[in-house]
């Protein structure tokens, strides 16, 4: 059975944005979907988020897929960074993501442990980054960095904002399509 883990961003929750829609659509395909309620979402810390993911995702394998939005992307990258080197996962979709510090100083703790790009690339079959060219929170250069450092497929959406509910994204068919391709559906 395919397992999909969705990680929201800073200040987020499982009931916002396109997460409930994506969960429902994936469950229709027979997948097991978990949309996490990350701890202390208004004051997130690297150690709490990593510990939480490690306690919730047991024995990830090639049938495990990850979807992150915004801060959820670096949280997933750090989770993968901390896996045993022989663990392989099916794929990752980063939406409005970043893997190096941005202008939110309070999030810098997520970068204290450097990412091992080789390890992350080796543990996943495919990484896709979906970004917007006018995201008010995540600079475009972050998308390029994900593409270059993690060999990700980059999909740029024109005028998509932060690709969240505020930007009109309560459904996100592109994320579903890319996950289905990864899973062979």
Image (cartoon, helix red, strand yellow):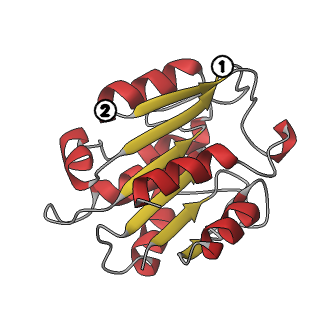
In the image, 151 versus 85, the foreground residue is 151
Q: Position of residue 98 (x, y in %)?
A: 50, 36
In the image, 183 versus 128, the foreground residue is 183
Q: Residues within 10 Å of mark 1 (few under 14, many from 20)?
A: some
Vertical relation: 85 (above or below) 130: below
Q: In the visual, does 48 lie left or right of 24?
A: left
The residue lying at 32 percent from left, 47 percent from top is 113
Q: Which residue is mark 1?
A: 133
Q: Secondary structure at mark 1?
A: loop
* Pointers 2 and 1 in contact (C-beta within 8 Å): no
Q: Which residue is mark 2?
A: 151
Residue 153 visible in rendering: yes
Q: In the visual, does 78 lie left or right of 67?
A: left
Mark 2 to mark 1 CA distance (whole Å): 19 Å
Q: Position of residue 165 (x, y in %)?
A: 83, 47
Residue 57, by quadrant, is bottom left
The residue lying at 72 percent from left, 35 percent from top is 162
Q: Residues within 10 Å of mark 2 (few under 14, many from 20)?
A: some
Vertical relation: 116 (above or below) 141: below
Which comes sooner in the sequence, label 2 or label 1? 1
In the image, 126 versus 42, the foreground residue is 126
Q: In the visual, does 152 lie left or right of 86?
A: right
Q: Residue furthest left?
A: 86
Q: Position of residue 174 (x, y in %)?
A: 63, 43
The residue lying at 28 percent from left, 51 percent from top is 125
In the image, 45 versus 61, the foreground residue is 61
The residue lying at 29 percent from left, 43 percent from top is 115
Q: Quarter of the image containing the N terminus?
A: bottom left
Q: Position of residue 157 (x, y in %)?
A: 66, 26
Q: Secondary structure at mark 2?
A: loop
């Amino acid at each position: 059975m395919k397992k999909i883990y969705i990680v929201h961003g800073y200040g987020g929750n499982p009931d916002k944005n396109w997460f409930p829609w994506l969960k429902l659509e994936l469950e229709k395909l027979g997948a097991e979907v978990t949309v996490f309620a990350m701890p202390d979402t208004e004051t997130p810390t690297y150690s709490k988020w990593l510990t939480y993911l490690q306690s919730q995702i047991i024995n990830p394998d090639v049938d495990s897929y990850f979807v992150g939005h915004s801060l959820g992307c670096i949280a997933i990258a750090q989770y993968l960074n901390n896996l045993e080197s022989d663990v392989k996962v099916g794929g990752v979709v980063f939406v409005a993501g970043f893997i190096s510090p941005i202008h939110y100083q309070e999030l810098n703790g997520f970068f204290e442990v450097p990412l091992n790009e080789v390890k992350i690339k080796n543990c996943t079959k495919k990484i896709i980054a979906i970004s917007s060219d006018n995201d008010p929170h995540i600079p475009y250069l972050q998308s390029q960095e994900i593409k270059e450092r993690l060999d990700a497929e980059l999909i740029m959406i024109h005028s998509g904002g932060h690709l969240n509910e505020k930007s009109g994204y309560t459904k996100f068919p592109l994320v579903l399509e890319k996950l289905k391709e990864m899973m062979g559906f």
